[in-house]
Amino acid sequence: MKLKAIIHKAEEGGYWAEVPALKGCYSQGETLEETKANIQEAIEGYLEAIHKMPLLQTLKLKYSIFQ
């Protein structure tokens, strides 16, 4: 499985990273190397957590109600 992680420079210094394909998967670090290691750990934790959840709990449904 290939995932795209986007690393940004943080305004306050250091870096932060996000994985667009994994909603809510973010991390940060003082250096690029630290940020890469941290986002890898965040991805592993995210995937491990959703693997343990029943399918219905991982689905997010959006409802539109028209009257």
Image: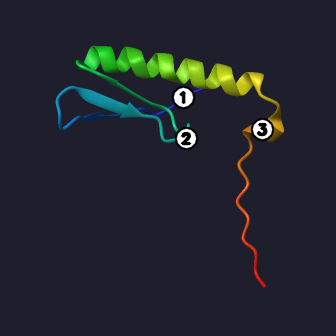
Query: The disc labelled 1 sits on which kind of residue?
Result: Lys
Residue placed at 26% from the left, 28% from the top?
A: 15
Residue 50 location in percent, x, y? 69, 28
Could you tell me how far apart the alpha carbons at marks 1 and 3 are, in whole angstroms?
Answer: 24 Å
Residue placed at 55% from the left, 41% from the top?
A: 23
Q: Nearer the viewer, mark 1 or mark 2?
A: 2
Query: The disc labelled 2 sits on which kind of residue?
Result: Lys
Instruction: Judge from the rendering whether residue 29 lies leftward or rightward of residue 55; answer left or right.
Output: left
Q: Quadrant of residue 29?
A: top left
Could you tell me how far apart the alpha carbons at marks 2 and 3 are, in whole angstroms?
Answer: 14 Å
Q: Which residue is mark 2?
A: 23
| Circle 2 residues within 10 Å: few <14, some 14–19, many ≥20 | few
Q: Nearer the viewer, mark 1 or mark 3?
A: 3
Query: The disc labelled 3 sits on which kind of residue?
Result: Gln
Instruction: Judge from the rendering whether residue 56 lies leftward or rightward of residue 27; answer left or right.
Output: right
Q: Quadrant of the N terminus?
A: top right
Instruction: Judge from the rendering whether residue 43 lies leftward or rightward of residue 50; answer left or right.
Output: left
Residue placed at 73% from the left, 24% from the top?
A: 51
Residue 26 location in percent, x, y? 44, 32
Q: Which residue is mark 3?
A: 57
Task: Name the image colouring.
Answer: rainbow
Q: Residue furthest bottom?
A: 67
